[in-house]
Amino acid sequence: MRVPLSWLREYVDLPAGETGRDVAAKLVDAGLEVETVEQLGAGLKGPLVVGQVLTIEELEGFRKPIRFCTVDVGRANGTGEPQEIVCGARNFSVGDKVVVVLPGAVLPGDFAIASRKTYGKTSHGMICSGEELGMGDDGWGSPRTESGGGIIVLPPEHEVGTDAIELLQLVDEVLDIDITPDRGYCMSMRGVAREAATAYGLPLRDPALLDVPAPNSYGYLVKIDDPAGCDRFTARTVTGLDPEARSPIWLTRRLQKAGMRPISLAVDVTNYVMLELGQPLHAYDRSRLDGAIGVRRAEQGEKFTTLDGVKRTLDAEDLVITDNSGPIGLAGVMGGANTEIADSVTDPETGQVTGTTDVVIEAAHFDSVSISRTARRLKLSSEASKRFERGVDPQAAAAAAQRTVDLLVLLAGGTAEAGVTELTAPGAPRTIAMSADHPDRVAGMDYGRETVVRRLQEVGCDVYGQDELVVTVPSWRPDLAEPNDLAEEVIRLEGYGNLPSTLPQVPSGRGLTARQQLHRRVGRALAGAGYVEALSYPFLGEGVFDQLQLPADDAARRVVKLVNPISDEEPALRTTLLPGLLGALRRNDSRGSHDLALFETGSVFLAGERAGVAVRLPVDRRPTDEEIATLNAALPAQPRYAAVVLAGAREAAGWWGKGRPADWADAVQAARSLAVEAGAELVVRQGQYGPWHPGRCAELVVTLDGVETVIGHAGELHPRVVKAMGLPARTSAMELDLDRLAAAGGEAVRAPRISTFPVATQDVALIVDASVPAADVEAALREGAGELLESLRLFDVFTGEQVGEGKKSLAYALRFRAADRTLTAEESTAARDAAVALAAERAGAVLRGA
């Protein structure tokens, strides 16, 4: 909402010396978000005056049309003689009143004006366009041109020599305020003025306090078929409008400063009143209406052409304004092309001007949810819909209609018909019961009943009672629904900066939970291994599962969908971390970073049977364990996952030697490092799942309650997945369930016992069938070696003629150590032989060379 300071002063007597930044500071303290304060006319210096064109001489022989003009500027030039000016614009004629800047003046942008010779003539100043004065170019051209652009052509009533800086209101300050959804009343000058008056402790001249005639039976006929969607509809009629009447300068300038484009007098007036009072209005050409105006829900698939010329297909939830011909407006969003105000047209033969002369004014109140859904579904956001979806004061409709009628009568010479239509659904003001000390308890400081009552009255509430208050909420504050909302108003107006800063008392014995500690250890471990954390949004589109080649019945495809997603392309909550991580890897690779190792830990959301509906937890106390359990039961399961993705070089090449590309083994090692942090025994075996290459996919297994459980996968992604998602070749990834890994590891990670005695190393090379997993051989060696085995590492895999067809050689390094003595060669050899014997028994291993 753009708020010109000069317009704001019309409703609040701000101190004369207050600048826009001073007012902005006050409004920020009151809780409004003032983004910028724009200085209009900064650096502008006169003389800038009204002139009248006396003569125009067309100069020939130049590449573009040039005119040499003489302009009467009165005594502004000190001589009273006509001012000679060269101008290239063509949208003005002899006799027109224009804006002239004289030598010595400075225009916005530090553009100094001086006499200069050009096109063989000396130009003593400029005839100005709106753009040159920083006004914009809309609506300032001559009425003889369709574009309306170019040189400013003023109405003939302005006297020659008049100061144009004051006439055109060129110097002003405009506050640009970002209105949050709960403060819809501030999308009007009335609402911002109320906040300014409260902030300064000054009275407000409410522009909605107008004498409005009572409704009667001979107004324009209106029928409402859906009172839930439209609970108030006011209709007024003005006849005899002058089709040649144009918006006056003051109205046009206020619209421009507020960020709106002047169109025509009738439309400008409705926009002006909307900005002033916050009530959207619509004007219909009465000659184009066919019978009574109605309000109903659209028929499914019904067609309607809006003012922008687009034919739209409506939904049964949309509210429409109708007459006997069908829809004539999309309620609260945009009017129809078939009843729009007609532009004035001059007959070239007779000179007669025709256009809209009779209008019907609509000021209605529509359901905010319905308007919001329609605007979003049709992607048709308008100034009206922005206000309705945030909440419009229903009591302002009659005053807004009256204000529109008054302006049309004043500015267009119209006549207000006596008929007044006002349909209102039954309703009562909303009341909220609240203890007088509730704001004190919320803020943690003592305001007292007197302050609470005074602040609520400044908001517009009626307050009754002593210790227990009954508060009647004003019609323009639909966001005030419960005691905490009222407490927030008191705290806001008393000043957030006045709240004391007190640190909460932390009870002893509490710290990070085991889950939180593991989360931190995992992050440190992956960061230490060279991974960079990348946080992604927890939303995805279901098409990504096809890119990951997940089967149709895969559990990951059962997603939880959001009712109001941020993006229609990603309406579901993630069941896997890979889409977000792979998207981050793809973006970074496309921007020149090719050696990438990224990780993320976060929740995924698994759909399942949910018990009941989520309850609303209290904010005035800690929820009970039962309330939290009920809430959790209604929510989807949210386990914490960990994932990594890799591409490019894992080790860079240099003078120290050749580099090494990232591969599936790095992804598997990332899983092993997480198992170490969790204190869990992780089994890695060959697997096959969705996005991973079937020959380079590892299954990550832990034992839970005596049952082997797959908690994730690691390896190289399938080439088809790489192609579908635009990833670098040979991209690898790992993902596992961090909660299940923690459950397999026990409550605490135990530090290893360090022996002071030397280690004994024994290497063995075993020949097994190529189909035998290395994990099975390793498990047999560990069990057979016994308690003296400190570590076991596979350091070589060999296949070839030397070991035979269908065979492979697995070479292991076994480290033995005792805690209380130095092992003898006989003891370490015996342990090795026992390990080899069990491997031979279980996996058919044969000692190579035996």
Image: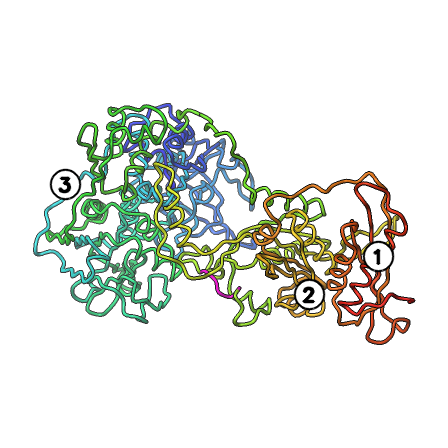
Instruction: Tell me if label 2 and label 1 are in contact, CB under 8 Å.
Output: no
Task: List x then y, in percent, for residue 465.
Answer: 17, 30
Q: Is residue 172 magenta?
A: no
Q: Which secondary structure is most common in the magenta stretch? A: loop
Q: Residues within 10 Å of mark 3 (few under 14, many from 20)?
A: few
Point 69% across, 50% down: residue: 673
Report, in whole angstroms, how far the alpha carbon at label 2 lies from the one at label 1. 31 Å
Give the mark nearer the N terminus: 2 vs 3.
3
What coloring was used for the rendering? rainbow
* Residue interval drawn in magenta: 556-560
Report helix, strand or loop for mark 2: strand
* Image disc number at residue 832: 1
Residue 715 position (above or below residue 553): above
Which residue does the numbered mark 3 point to in the structure image? 211
Above or below residue 64? Residue 699 is below
Residue visible at 89% across and 47% down in the picture: 824
| Crowding at mark 2 (Cα within 10 Å: few <14, some 14-19, many 20+) | many
Label ID, residue 697: 2
Residue 192: % across, % down: 32, 37
Q: Earlier along the polypeptide chain: callout 3 or callout 1?
A: 3
The amino acid type found where label 3 is placed reads Asp
